Amino acid sequence: MRTGIAHLPLHYGKAPTWLFGRMKNLAREIVSAIVSEYGKDEFLFKISDPFWFQAFGCCLGFDWHSSGLTTTVLGALKEGLKGADKELGIFVAGGKGATSRKTPYEIEQVGQKRLVNIDPRLLIYASRMSAKVDNTALQDGYQLYHHSFIFTKDGKWAVVQQGMNPLYRLARRYHWLSENTSDFVCEPHKAVCCDKATSTLNLVAKESSECRATSAKLCLEKPEKIVQDFKSLRLDRHHAVSIDDIQPENLKKILLKTYQTQPKNFEQLLGIQGVGPKTIRALALISELIHGKAPSFRDPVRFSFAHGGKDGHPYPVNREEYDRSIQILKSAINQARVGQSEKSKAIKRLSNF
């Protein structure tokens, strides 16, 4: 029997108003208590920890294991902190669907009010690159539909975003933390969480470094040459990546843009508007089959819903960290300015989790 594993079944719909209102209030109180006791950086560290995130959602009262926990908890957090964000020094931008595309504007609005001690363009870049990586450089079959960017007045940040795979009826969540992200395109995640491993083109794996470099260099060549190389590709039917949906003429249009831009590295290439999964996939395959620089097909999914399993898998239990996570939440709930019954229910849900 396996331990430390959780399914994230894909659920549609929305939380009922009566529940969401309570979640907003409790989220605000818990965050306020954590920031007061441990500081803003500790809250970012915790929100980027999948186990703590699940426990937080459980405290707020949502189904602990469903995909809806991610979107509802982050929505409650964003709404709950409105009006208190300036005092706490913690801001939440983005959200589900069309709201996620407003993230740059929301970050810019905070910057214009001089509520952050950093150029907001750096935060916008971090938000944009985290989404671009998980939708384009990491091709795992999960399409992003939720992007939340949590940041402090000191310019530190965390990202929690989620993708869906309707075929498997599962969701996959991606956690980022600025403290852990020294390179946007090489092992940038704090955690990637899902129960089902997939056939994945992973251009942000450490072992894809040569493929990333070659892909960027290819864009310095004339588009006609790259398209010609692409047309000459002959893939084994068991190859992990398909090229059937890549049209050479469409590829040529994007490559003309990259050729004019002359990206210096893979990160700059990925940041060019219009460079999507198909372009990156074509360049990676040319790099592998013509230049001998293969990408990684290792799925980066790592289970972090528990601090390990009793049998040592996926890794030994860190009892100290486990107990500290629980204690922080219990302490925050006790300090929350809500009714005693709400506190009791939240602690009971946490105990059940």
Image (cartoon, rainbow, N blue to C red):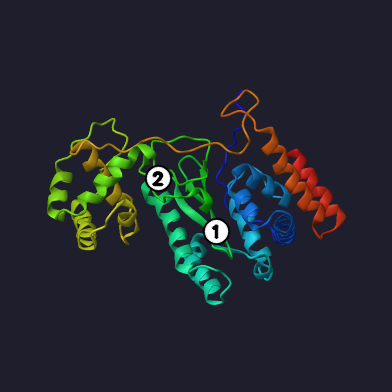
Task: Note whether residue 82 is visible.
Answer: yes
Q: Residue at 46%, 34% (x, y): give it.
A: 197
Q: Which amino acid type is shown beneath numbered disc 2?
A: Cys
Q: Earlier in the sequence, mark 1 or mark 2?
A: 1
Q: Is residue 323 left or right of residue 248?
A: right
Residue 109, relative to residue 214: is it above or below?
below
Task: Note whether residue 160 is visible.
Answer: no
Q: Where is residue 184 in the image (x, y as percent from the top left)?
A: 41, 51
> Helix or strand or loop: what does disc 2 sit on?
loop
Q: Which amino acid type is shown beneath numbered disc 1?
A: Lys
Number of numbered discs: 2
The quarter of the image holding the C terminus is: top right
User: Which residue is labeled 1 in the image?
Assistant: 156
Q: Position of residue 98 (x, y in %)?
A: 49, 64
Q: Residue at 20%, 49% (x, y): give it.
A: 218
> Helix or strand or loop: what does disc 1 sit on?
loop
Q: In this view, does 50 lie to the left or right of 98?
A: right
User: Which residue is labeled 2 in the image?
Assistant: 186
Q: Distance between the residues labelled 1 and 2?
A: 19 Å
Direction bottom: furthest residue: 113
Q: Nearer the viewer, residue 35 or 52?
A: 35
